[in-house]
Amino acid sequence: MELNKLLILFIVVLHQPTTVRSSTDVCHLEAASRLRANVDAHKRQKAERENKKKRGRWGAKGKGTEVQSTPGVLEFLLPNNETLIGRLCKSLSLHFCLTRFRYTQNPNGLRYPTVGDKMMFELLIIHRYRSLNWFSLYPQTGGCCKYQVRQYSQYGQVMGVGPAEYFASVSDFSLRNKHLSYIYSSYNETRLSNIIERVGFGPHKLKVSGKYKKDFDFIFPIASSLTPTLRFS
């Protein structure tokens, strides 16, 4: 099985966005709707810029160079029985738990954080985190939104990324310009294999980290819905 096809196994949206009927949430929903409109506008502008780049980069043989993708990695935690955080994830999903989008470089140049960045991001994510399987795992298991806002602050805002742009990146489960680029794994003495605990997808070369042993296979955790017999070295 090709490593690139692993993305299809992980990127499965399990839930539809929750319909909120409480009147106390009306203001939040309206604000979130406006912010999501900004996200959609950002996506359209980004697509237009990429199309212009593609049209302007035709070579002599009629083939265009690849459009540069978002410089970052979309990361997931796999449910497992080996670690505390893996067991917490398992209690919420047998497929995956979204952890973050980690920007590896500043995509926009100089942008200073604003006072309202975190509040705006919370409004964007509060009614969507379940549909993305993006749960707080510790210490607030299954909730929102301190953990999610912290991920934006640490891996997006500090890189000059606004809340709408970060939301667009973390919620983009498409296959375009993505392949398996990150594995975190730990060696398991009982199974004599390296258990894959986390994976990431992006445009970069594959990087493997963790407490793994090079001479042993990498396998999926039994607690995951993925087949535990899939192996690669």
Image: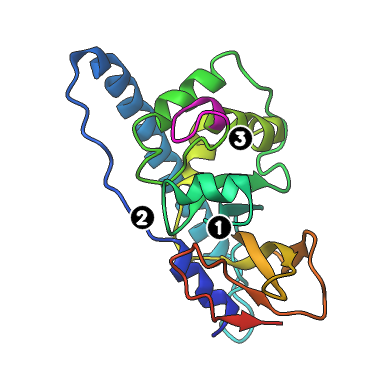
Q: Residue beneath label 3, please?
A: 151
Q: Which of the two discs, 2 and 1, labels the residue nearer the N terminus? A: 2
Q: How many marks?
A: 3
Residue 40 is left or right of residue 215, and the answer is left
Q: Which residues make up the magenta segment?
A: 139-147
Residue drawn 30% across the image and 49% down it: 15
Q: Which residue is mark 2?
A: 13
| Of callouts 3 and 2, the N-terminal one | 2
Q: Nearer the viewer, residue 220 or 147?
A: 220
Q: Secondary structure at mark 2?
A: loop
Coloration mode: rainbow
Instruction: Please determine whether, in this image, residue 167 is positioned above or below residue 185.
Output: above
Estimate the x, y position of residue 232 in percent, counting from the top left.
Answer: 65, 82
Residue for point 56% across, 54% down: 76
The kind of secondary structure element at disc 3 is: helix
Q: Which mark is residue 15?
A: none
Q: Are marks 3 and 2 in contact (CB under 8 Å)?
A: no
Kind of residue sitting beneath label 3: Gln
Mark 1 packing: few (<14 Cα in 10 Å), some, or many (20+)? Answer: many
Q: Secondary structure at mark 1?
A: loop
Up-down relation of residue 145 to residue 71 (above or below): above
User: Splitting the image into 4 quarters, where does residue 229 fall?
Assistant: bottom right
Which residue matches tag 1? 80
Question: Which residue type carries mark 1?
Answer: Asn
